[in-house]
Image (cartoon, helix red, strand yellow):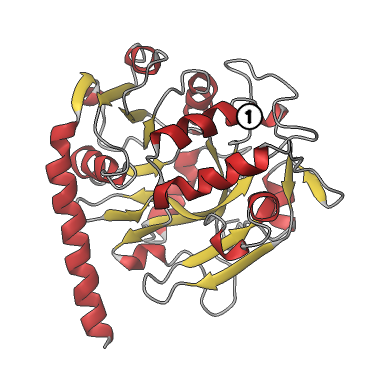
Amino acid sequence: MDLIEKYRLRMRRRRWLYRAFRKRRQLSLISDNTSNIRADDIMLCATVRDEKLRLPYFLKYYRDLGVEHFLFIDNDSSDGTAEYLSRQKDVSVWHSKGSYRKARFGVDWINWLLMRYARNHWVITVDVDEFFVYPFCDTRPLRALTDWLDAGERRSFGAMLLDMYPKGSIGQVPYRSGQDPMEILSWFDSGNYSITRNPRFKNLWIQGGPRARVFFGDTPDKAPALNKVPLVKWDWRYAYESSTHMVLPRVLNNTYDRQGGEVASGILLHTKFLPTFDAKVKEEMARNQHYANSKEYASYHQALQEDPEFWCKWSEKYINWRQLEILGLMSKGNWA
């Protein structure tokens, strides 16, 4: 039976690769700096729409970590996002007016760019509200992590999405371009997480945190997934299955120890709840381009009418990666 499932997943991966190849026609090149990509560059890939406000700090953060080239897909922004990105020498930008939903929520576009440009590169695939934290990130560049992964013949690195939130109402403190969003979104849930193992894709499925208790209190099983595989040494035969929650071949989802030990892992600090969140929810409700007819955004919209507060007496204020390791949310494993 497992051989049959392996065959089905192989066919599924080929289907996603073929879709990505077809969807390349929806991408038009705006700014091409790909000739500057060196053989060992660490890369980042993201899809954006109207995110000019966030981009200055996002680019600075990942440049400081050690990302050397960025691949962006602009999904028809109207706020100057594409123009801003086009002025960056370490960024290549594509534009698409295509349906985000019909491109499997941007995954088809991302799979194409990774297939075309990221072969044999370590690449981070994230949203612009996600900030990668890994063991020793305060003292060691990202290349130290990828070199260690190469030495151990590991081609992927897992991370849990950690929702950050303010103390007080969303929108109480304004956000300015270039500001570290963690200055406003300083708090997180240290517990309240459930973990199950996906038998088909062999990945862990994590749910919980503030979104589960505030927006999905009555239906926690429908809360957004928090498991991610954001860092992969890419091969043209790989394909993301569902956002970066899982990737094929499924061996890349094996970012944990099945025997109960610890494997090095990271965190994606999720800064979704800036003061712009309410306007973003209304826009996405109107566009209806997200998963399951934007049911997640419908839950956000309904709850926001009551001006909810995420902070509670069990909230933790973010300090650094070591704090997250002590709380058991990430691990340095055997990386000393």
- Which residue is found at the position 63% from the left and 67% from the top? 194
**Which element type, helix, strand or loop, lies under badge 1?**
loop
In which quadrant of the rendered view does residue 86 lie?
A: top left
Q: Is residue 35 above or below residue 2?
A: above
Determine whether, in the image, residue 2 is placed left or right of residue 60. Answer: left
Q: Is residue 32 visible?
A: no
Callout count: 1
Residue name at image x 54 percent, y 80 percent: 259
Question: From the image, which quarter does the N terminus lie in?
Answer: bottom left
**Alpha-carbon neighbours of circle 1 within 10 Å: few (<14), some, or many (≥20)?**
many
Residue 100 position within the rendered picture, expressed as x and y whole percent measured from the top left = 31, 38
Tag 1 residue: 274
Q: Looking at the image, is 255 positioned above or below residue 143?
A: below
The percent coordinates of residue 161 (x first, y second) are 56, 50
User: Who is closer to the viewer here, 212 or 10?
Assistant: 212
Residue 24 visible to the viewer: yes
Q: Position of residue 321 (x, y in %)?
A: 67, 46
Given residues 1 and 153, the one toward you in this image is 1
Q: Is residue 73 above or below residue 266?
A: above
Q: Which amino acid type is marked by label 1? A: Leu
Q: Name which residue lies at 64% across and 25% down.
A: 180
Q: Quadrant of residue 126?
A: top left
Q: Quadrant of residue 108?
A: top left
In the current view of this chain or complex, which residue is farthest to the bottom? 1
Which sits in the foreground, 331 or 238?
A: 238
| 331 sits to left or right of 101 | right
Q: Residue at x 43, y 67 (%)?
A: 254
In which quadrant will I find the C terminus? bottom right
Residue 224: percent from left, percent from top:
53, 54
Q: Is residue 122 left or right of residue 306?
A: left
Outermost residue to the right:
313
